[in-house]
Amino acid sequence: MRKVGFIYDEVFLRHEPPSWHSDSKDRLINIIITLKAAGLWDSLLHFKPRRALDSDLAAVHTPGHIDRIKAFSAGELDPDTFLSEDSREAALHAAGAVMEAVDRCKAGEVERAFCAVRPPGHHAEADSAMGFCIFNNVAVGARYAQKIGFRKVFIIDFDAHHGNGTQHIFEEDDSVFYFST
């Protein structure tokens, strides 16, 4: 059986947009319930995410964006993107989860990893949060992979719609290929 890592922490449940918002902690809770019901939970290797540092974020985000998120306590960043008291911490761990997955794969501990995180990240631009996303988790992870020795990165974005932030961050960079389904 292939070794699959599952990176998760309850910090992700503390990101709480308004109750009417479609980004809900139930998404992660239901993933765990489904994995357990299917008998897959115990076959996964479970890891906690690290907390991304400002220097990790700065590989893809502008200082202005990082500072705005630090200074913003709670409320609406744009019509789709909200911060609650613990959202910044959840977002730092979401970006760190991808870095953790890269390390675990590179070390051969797992062959692949799934990061069960929120807030999501693929809409976050270099200079702004957008579309539920605070920091671009995958972009942070891709730059981290390059920092530790991977020359090229291939990103496949499986979602109902396009991950504009990830595309924009890498569209002039031949070392990262972004593909959205």
Image: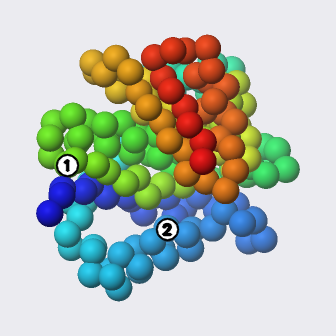
Please identify the quarter of the rendering in which residue 53 is found: top left
Residue 39 vs residue 164: left or right? left
On the rendered image, what quadrant is the N terminus found in? bottom left
Q: Which mark is residue 110?
A: 1
Q: Which x, y percent locates residue 20?
A: 78, 71
Residue under the image location 56 percent in, 73 percent down:
26
The mark closer to the camera, 2 or 1, is 1
Q: Which x, y percent locates residue 60?
A: 55, 22
Secondary structure under tag 1 reads loop
Q: Which sits in the foreground, 23 or 153?
A: 153
Q: Which residue is mark 2?
A: 28
Q: Quick check: 43 above or below 124?
A: below
Please identify the quarter of the rendering in which residue 102 is found: top left
Q: How is the image coloured?
A: rainbow
Q: Which x, y percent locates residue 113?
A: 32, 51
Judge the density around disc 1: few (<14), some (14-19), many (≥20) Cα neighbours within 10 Å: some
Residue under the image location 20 percent in, 48 percent down:
110
Judge the density around disc 2: few (<14), some (14-19), many (≥20) Cα neighbours within 10 Å: some
Secondary structure under tag 2 reads helix
Residue under the image location 41 percent in, 79 percent down:
34
Residue 57 vs residue 168: left or right? left
